[in-house]
Image (spheres, helix red, strand yellow):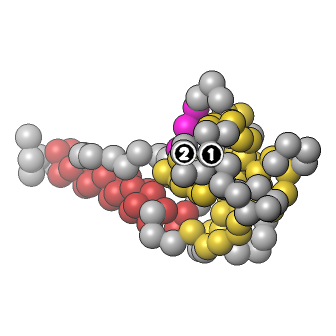
């Protein structure tokens, strides 16, 4: 069985206060994932570098030398409801809100993974029962 990677790819274009792209610039980004009650369920600090178009690309939920994971990404209960992502970036002095939006399609793969795990467990229990009564070898 194939399993989805327990991480989210995310991209963001960063600009300075004057609206100029932060091209080829080292940046720090604070990422928070919040539930529908505005509770933080996951945070991660990311150090990365933008490309020539000001685009920063990173993978949320992975262990890496440039990331500090404060909570367990795999423990997020994706099937429990709607989640939001909050991005703050450090323009040099302090972190400021960059973006706050709903997470839509990707986490459903994680919820499906959880359901598949539940299904695998049920199938294993049924097979064990059928073996115990001699209906399958």
Highlighted range, magenta? 59-63
State the residue at coordinates (45%, 63%): 106
Left or right of 136 on screen, residue 31: right
State the residue at coordinates (48%, 62%): 107
Classified by dominant secondary structure, the portion drawn in magenta counts as loop
Q: Which residue is mark 2?
A: 52
Q: Which residue is mark 1?
A: 23
Residue 28 locus on image (x, y percent): 74, 41
Q: Pick whichever, 82 or 55, lies toward us.
A: 55
Residue 40 within the magenta-colored segment of the rendering: no
Left or right of 21 on screen, residue 74: left
State the residue at coordinates (71%, 41%): 27
Q: Is residue 123 above or below residue 35?
A: above
Residue 29 locus on image (x, y percent): 72, 47
Residue 61 within the magenta-colored segment of the rendering: yes
State the residue at coordinates (54%, 43%): 51
Mark 1 lies on a secondary structure that is loop
Rounded to the nearest angstrom, the CA distance separating label 1 from label 2 is 5 Å
Q: Is residue 58 visible?
A: no
For the residue carrying disc 1, how many other residues have a C-alpha within 10 Å: few (<14), some (14-19), or many (20+)? some
Residue 47 locus on image (x, y percent): 68, 36
Tag 1–tag 2 contact (CB < 8 Å):
yes
Q: Is residue 97 visible?
A: yes
């Amino acid at each position: 069985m194939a399993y989805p990677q327990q991480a989210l790819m995310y991209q963001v274009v960063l600009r300075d206060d004057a609206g100029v792209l932060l091209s080829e610039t080292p940046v720090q980004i604070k990422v928070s994932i919040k539930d529908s009650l505005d509770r933080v369920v996951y945070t991660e600090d990311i150090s990365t570098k933008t490309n020539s178009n000001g685009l920063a690309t990173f993978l949320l939920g992975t262990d890496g030398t440039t990331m500090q994971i404060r909570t367990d990404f795999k423990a997020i209960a994706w099937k429990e409801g709607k989640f939001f992502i909050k991005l703050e970036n450090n323009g040099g002095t302090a972190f400021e809100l960059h973006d706050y939006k709903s997470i839509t399609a990707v986490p459903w793969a994680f919820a499906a993974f959880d359901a598949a795990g539940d299904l695998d467990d049920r199938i294993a229990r049924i097979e064990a029962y059928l073996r115990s009564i001699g209906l399958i070898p």
